[in-house]
Amino acid sequence: MNVDRNKAQGMKISLRIALFAWQITFMTIVVLVLFIIPQQKRTFIQNLHSKANGVAVSLRDVAAGAALNEDYASLVTASETLLRGDPGLDFLIIVRNDGFSIINEQKSWRVETISDSFLLPETRDSFGSIRTMPLLNRRVFHYAQPFDYSGIQWGWIHVGLSLEDYDQSVADIYINTILLALLCIFFSFLLSLLYAGRMVRPIHRLRDIVQKVAGGDLDVRADEVRRDELGDLADSINIMIESLLRRDRIMESVRFAGQKLMLIDSWADAINDILAKIGQATDASRAYFFENRLDDDDRLLCSLRYEWAAQGISSRLPNPDLQDVAYSDYALDRWVERLSSGRIICGAISDLSRAEQFFPASQNTLSIIVVPVFFEGIWRGFLGLDDCETARVWTDTDKDSLRAIADLVGATHSRQLFQKALLESKVTLEQRVHERTRELRDQVIVKEKALADLAEAQSSLLEASRSAGMAEVATGVLHNVGNVLNSVNVSCTLIRDQLKESRVGNVSRAAGLLAENEGRLVQFLSDDPRGRRIPAYLLSLGSALEEENQAMSREAEYLFDRMEHIKEIVNMQQSYGRVSGVEETIAPEQLMEDALKLNSGSLARHQVTVQRAYEPVAPLIIDKHKVLQILLNLINNAKYACDATGGSEKVITLRIFTAASDRVIMQVSDNGMGIAPENLTRIFRHGFTTRKTGHGYGLHSGALAAKELGGNLNAYSDGPGCGATFTLELPHSLRRERT
């Protein structure tokens, strides 16, 4: 794939070079064509001009003699001779100054008198050009020349030459020039393409080498042997590859030093291997480490502790002359200044001062690089590289690698000191940890007991809150049942009174009279005054009994409805009185209406008007007991808040809608006494209440229940006397919200 791509790229480069050369050739040809063709056309016109001039000159004397003698026969004869002898001669016109003209064409001639200013120009100079003659309506080369006799101009000779040969010659020039240009362009493009390919091939080879080097292959070399820029480029690439190889060796020595120092307990155990690695990688003659110390006179001394020497280079260990060497004895004060401040000494020995040269020169060193080593921020010695063969220029890679190794040695020494300190403090730390653990264990025991007490108190509080809530539910149920039972008692009394006053007994008496007179029933009904009253009486009695039956049926139906209402209230109380914690699917508006039903008796007794504003909301999957407990408490509190104002209009507004976060919002608003701003954050605290008979459980337990349901309960009021709104926010699904 890469080979195909490289070939394609090579073709593109060759094509671009060829196109560039072709463009230059094309522009050159165009310039030549633009120059040659007009030049050739001028040459043809000059030839026409010369020919026409020759014809005019040959007729000039004849025309002058004819004008002088008024003998024009000779002029006509001479003109016809010229026309017959040259087919390219289109016409000859001889015009006198008075307008008399002889017009000679190839097959005819005629005499006319004309006044055309073109044929009788005011100038005395001859002229010629390609034009269309108005007189003959033909495109020709027109040439005009005056004829004189004895210094007097008698008229003009007009010569017309056919342009067939001229046009053909111009066309041939264009065709030949275009063909020649195309051939030149083709061969120039072909030659430039061949040359470009020959020039690009070594570039491609060098590019492939560079790509391999970029891919990590440093074994390739550019083998272009040329004495041009490409040869110089190949040499530069080879030098670059060697530099990269050397850099890799140096970086490998740094990685080796890091790994070696990481795995040992003392940097002194690895320093010899590290010096050998960096010395070989940098092609140095020596690699070494000098350590500093102060003598009794506080003089700064250095001693050679570790050294690696290349093959053929003698080692300086052991050498007493390189032990406890005072910097001041060799005028190395500048070294002390630079190295102690973290700078390096680098360069050829010849670049150093005469005093500084003595110490390294005595070791046959030609070039040197020295970097400081710091232990715990204190200058403790230096690492160095020597070149005893050339006064080399050390690269930035050499400097950076040696400095990195010096930093690694210093960091390893610091790590060793830290480990030592860590070991020394281990026993003390373990003792302190043991003591602290014992203290923490005691504290944990105390905190666990406190947490247990707190959990027990919280459980008692929750049970008390639930009991308080259920007590309110039970109170509402009893109020509602009591109201219904009052209606039942009234209905039962009405039915009892109606039964006492019933005229069903009169039916028995009428039936007794009919039974007594059964044998003479017809006579009794027609003759006996009592018998005659019986039919009318029975009709009246039947109507009264029917009305009585309807009234008792209505009371019985009403009594049945009241008993069903009692059954519904009891069932509702039993439903919500079960153990909480069970999630059920229920509509929010049903929960609100159930809470309203359980408070209906109390609300009616307190003359509170209820307004509803329900929006369509999806059913909830939730613990309906906890939600009902919250709503009951909110409606009950709203009722007492309306009572506290003493106003005639008491209104509670119930709202249900969905918030932007797809959570269900249930609100209970009132126009009651409102809430002071300082109490908005306190009303949900346990035991806080503004009612004399309140216990402070309701809102606190409601807030806790809302959090257990994955929602929240909050309050808002504009202040005392402005009413209040309590908002219960719930998720659609308690299980989903918890996950």
Image (cartoon, rainbow, N blue to C red):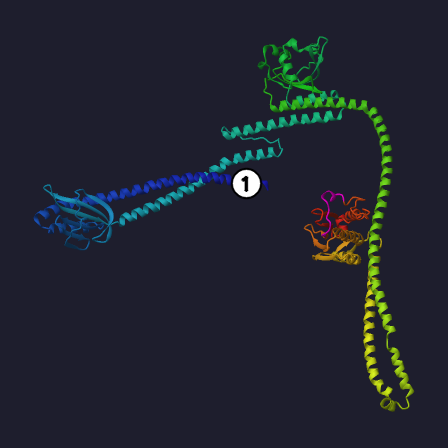
Q: Which residue is mark 1?
A: 7
Between 382 and 435, which is closer to the camera in this rendering?
A: 435
The answer to whether residue 727 is seen in the rendering is: no
Kind of residue indicated by mark 1: Lys
263 is within the stretch colored magenta? no
221 left or right of 383 in image: left
Vertical arrangement, residue 711 with respect to residue 339, above or below? below
Q: Is residue 396 left or right of residue 565?
A: left
Front position in the image: 624 or 33: 624
Q: Nearer the viewer, residue 538 or 140?
A: 538
In the displayed orientation, state which residue is furthest to the right: 516
| Res. 366 image quadrant | top right
Measured from the top left, where is residue 145 in percent x and y?
A: 17, 44
Q: Which residues are magenta?
A: 670-682
Q: Is residue 14 positioned above or below 508 on the image?
A: above
Rate crowding at label 1 as few (under 14), some (14 to 19) or many (20 or more) other CA atoms within 10 Å. Answer: few
| Residue 355 pos. (x, y %) | 60, 10
Q: Residue at x 83, y 77 (%)?
A: 545
